[in-house]
Amino acid sequence: MAGKPLPWLKLNHDYLDDPKLGALPEVIQLRYFKLYMLAHQCQADGAITLSPEEIAWKLHITLDELTQTQDALIKANLYRINGRGPEIPAYLGEQITQAQREEERLKKAGQRATKSMSPACPPHVPPRESESESESESESEVDIESEVDKDQVAISQSSQSHPDPDKRAAMDRLMQVSKLEIYNLLKIPPMYRFLLDDQEITATDLIAGLAYTTSSTRFRKPAICMAMNLVRHEYPEKQYYSPMNWGKLPRVIIDRIGDPDELHRKSLVSGEYSEFIEH
């Protein structure tokens, strides 16, 4: 869907020395720039998608005056009429098109997503026992690199360890909450909205992913880290699907889904969620 046009045009000062434009009467030159602005309003890559009557009304001239203006501009190679209607040939080379704006928007969104991953979003790996500051500071670069390699293996393993769809659907029913509600409660940025369209991802996945990212202070932005992991189909370890590990969830989520201990009790009674009880 096209957005609103930019409320301004880029006007090149070279027009002052353009012999094609300078040879025309000043009234025709003025109408040229009015037609240029009209093309910008139409957002059709330089084409004016209006009827001759509408164009004449916009320029506050008669149809005869419009025809004379168009003829003069066509002769000067500043204007043309093709299958789409009147067109300003210079528009595409001088202005920012809607396609270029969308491309730039997506590029910036990708850059923001990449920036939010590191160091705010470590990958999905089982949390290791905390070390003392002195032990952490004494680790060598070689040790750190080897740990990164181990993390990559852990990602691959944990991505395959999440519960089957029936079990996750059972917890969705138990919580009586939708992905959309969780998404909105956590104020997840719009760039991750396709989480809602991915049928493989359930509301329980969002809760379990959030349980993982809130389990450690490594994650500065738990909700965003959870979203980024899930869009890559990197699921948390199975233990985070158990309500027993949901005690650190944000208050806004607990208020919506209910007390984790009560959910755990209900899951014991229902039996549908027994796969997680051992955790």
Image (spheres, rainbow, N blue to C red):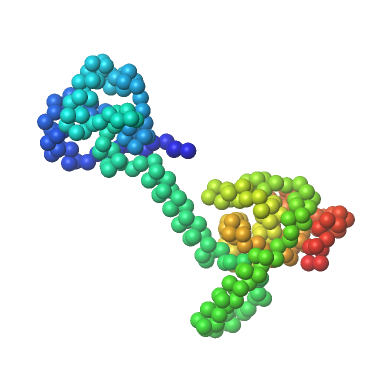
Q: Is residue 187 above or below residue 124?
A: above
Residue drawn 68% across and 56% down?
205
**Side of 116 where 105 appears, left or right:** left
**Side of 10 where 276 appears, left or right:** right
Q: Nearer the viewer, residue 11 or 216?
A: 11
Q: Is residue 79 above or below residue 95?
A: above
Within the image, what quadrant is residue 50 found in? top left
Looking at the image, which residue sits at the far front? 83
**Side of 74 where 216 appears, left or right:** right
Residue drawn 56% across and 51% down?
192
Q: Nearer the viewer, residue 259 or 82?
A: 82
Could you say where residue 168 lies in the image, as x and y percent from the top left? 74, 55
Q: From where the camera sits, is residue 240 visible?
A: no
Image quarter (top left, top right, bottom left or bottom right) of the C terminus: bottom right
Q: Is residue 34 above or below residue 17?
A: above
Within the image, what quadrant is residue 63 found in? top left
Could you say where residue 119 lies in the image, as x and y percent from the top left? 52, 66
Could you say where residue 275 lies in the image, as x and y percent from the top left? 80, 62
Residue drawn 86% across and 57% down?
271
Q: Nearer the viewer, residue 202 or 112?
A: 202
Looking at the image, which residue sits at the far right? 269
Could you say where residue 124 lies in the image, as x and y percent from the top left? 62, 66
Q: From where the camera sits, is residue 278 visible?
A: yes
Residue drawn 59% across and 82% down?
135
